[in-house]
Amino acid sequence: MSDYAQPSGAKHVAEAILFAEEIVAVPEDPKVKPRLLIERNDPNITVEALRDLLSESGEFFERGVPVRLTNDQLCGGKKAQIVSPDLLVMIAHHICRPYLSKESSDGSITEKDARLPLEVARMYLAWQGDWRLPHLRGISSAPMLTDEGLIHSSSGYDSISGMWCESIPDLSGLIPSNPTKEDAERSLRTIRDTFKTFCFADAETLFDPDTGVEIVNLDHAPGMDESGFLAALLTGVCRPSLPLAPGVLIHAASLSGAGAGKGLLARCICQIAFGKKPHAVTAGQSAEELEKRISAELIEGSPVVFLDNLNNRAFKSDQLASAITEDPARVRMFGKLQMVPINAHAFILLTGNGLTVSEDLARRFIEIKLDPKTENPETRAFSVDILAEVTKRRNELLAACLTIWRWGRINQNLETGTPLGSFEQWCRWVRDPLLALSCKDPVARVSEAKQRDSQRQRVSEIFLLWWNKHGDRAIEVKNLSDDLINLINPLDKSRQYLNSQVQRLVGTRIAGFVLVRNKSNAKWTPDSYTLKKIDGAETHRDHRGHRVSDDPPALPNSAPNSRKFVEPEPKPKTDPTDTGDVLPATCDPYDPYAFGGQDSECHNPVGWTGQI
């Protein structure tokens, strides 16, 4: 049939199809930004629209407060930056075009570009809980691990773990899928051989004619300090995947420890675990300044918090103690009376000469002691730049660490070491596989660190002298022996102060004793106190989980190589009517070991109420 024979309607349709032009979608101009209407009378509409734009951009996260990821040009990689009101105004103009709607004299509506009001930014930042931003737990350049032994090397934001992953090396073919104990032992040998020139204090060494220095004898099992290093290295590798993990303390002697290699060892650990050197942070001039610096480091989400040059001090930080054992931890925002929760997945490193930690931090740290056995460690010559070598061999050494880890995850029936509260998963992932490879248990040093704590030693002296003078008899504070009163109250402060210090010791278990308070039934009769021996030492554990000896130690002046105990001069009783009433004052009631000595931060009695 010819075209002319077709019905007129069908002919027109055929012509339309024949001469039709293809419709091509017009691509959106990336320079065209979405509009944001500024509602002056209904600011909640503007705040909600701004919230949706920020959450859809994929550039912002919640870390207790809204943050964005910025480039750390000093150390490389990303870090989290808190979004301030002024920064939010700038960001808003970067992702959208705020405008005002104005009515002209003729009744028409026109749009006029405008600056986002600062109060709108403040309203958004104050809208806690409704930001709709993905939660950022931290930043990692180490592979993400699972309890089943799987290793993930993806990049970008991991919604499952909440971590931002970057610069994670490809370890394909370097880690056996089902490693044997022989694989784990070879990996351990590789790591030990790389770090054999470090002067671990208790390591068995031999002279190496090739390098001209003393090196660790690899034919012997690792000592306690080298085992601590191996645990620290594996902790760094696993830290982004662990909810909680202890920190690492690297220290040397007070005067001759400079140049021993503490900072170098810390940087090598970070180079293997995270592929970059950490930036060092000093303690500052005060404890308050130290807490602020730690909070700033934690909020940034960096994989490492490295506190360097903490020399000749007993380190104490409530913020760091919370960050290590709490998930999430809470930190205070700068310039605000506001605490925000953050997930602190940072690897904590402390270094210093003559550095110890207070008792509350003792169980939270792995200890590594270096001893170069020379007066001038900085003059030692080495033929190899260990940091450059570690940087070059990062993939090999990281694979060696993960081979040990995976072997431990596959063989979950390994013998376990001493329990360490709060860090059970760390024990399974890090400590137990190393124990199975003949390393020593770094947890064993926790009790040693506690015994070195000066406040703990002071309380031990008080209890030992109390037992020597009064035994297990119930006694009121006013009837304590003069030399015991002088030991508790060396500055001869008021009787209220003395009562408050005794009250603080109630329930304390130390040196094989516990102090018990006997409440008085009479209204005006002061309470008495009884010092008791701790029974059942073979089966009883204290609140930290460590066994307590049934036999209390001897007085300090009878123990060999201990600090000599000097009997103080008797102090005359100046107030025969002392009833032991306790008055309010200003000391910290949560510090059970502050006795108001010259080196104590507490010089006033505590605000206890009632009678003792």
Image (cartoon, grey):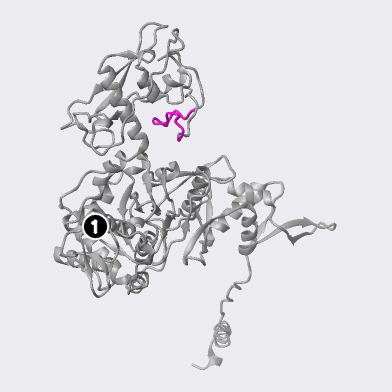
Please tell me how crowded label 1 is: few (under 14), some (14-19), or many (20+) other residues with Cα within 10 Å.
few
The answer to whether residue 142 shows anywhere in this view is: no
Residue drawn at 56 percent across, 79 percent down: 24
Helix, strand, or loop for circle 1? loop
Q: Is residue 346 above or below residue 500?
A: below
Residue drawn at 45 percent across, 53 percent down: 135
The answer to whether residue 105 shows anywhere in this view is: yes
Hey, which quadrant is residue 469 in on the image? top left
Hey, which quadrant is residue 212 in on the image? bottom left
The answer to whether 92 appears left or right of 528 in the picture is right
Identify the magenta region. 587-599
Residue ranking furthest to the right: 105
Hey, which quadrant is residue 384 in on the image? bottom left
Q: Is residue 356 above or below residue 600?
A: below
Nearest the viewer among 379 and 113 is: 379
Nearest the viewer among 375 and 74 is: 375
Question: Is 590 in the magenta?
Answer: yes
| Location of residue 65 in the rendering, given as x and y in whole percent from the top left corner | 52, 49
Question: Is 67 in the magenta?
Answer: no
Nearest the viewer among 33 and 274 is: 274
Principal secondary structure, stretch drawn in magenta: loop
Which residue position holds label 1? 148
Residue drawn at 19 percent across, 29 percent down: 550
| Location of residue 604 in the rendering, given as x and y in whole percent from the top left corner | 50, 26
User: Which quadrant is the C terminus positioned in?
Assistant: top left
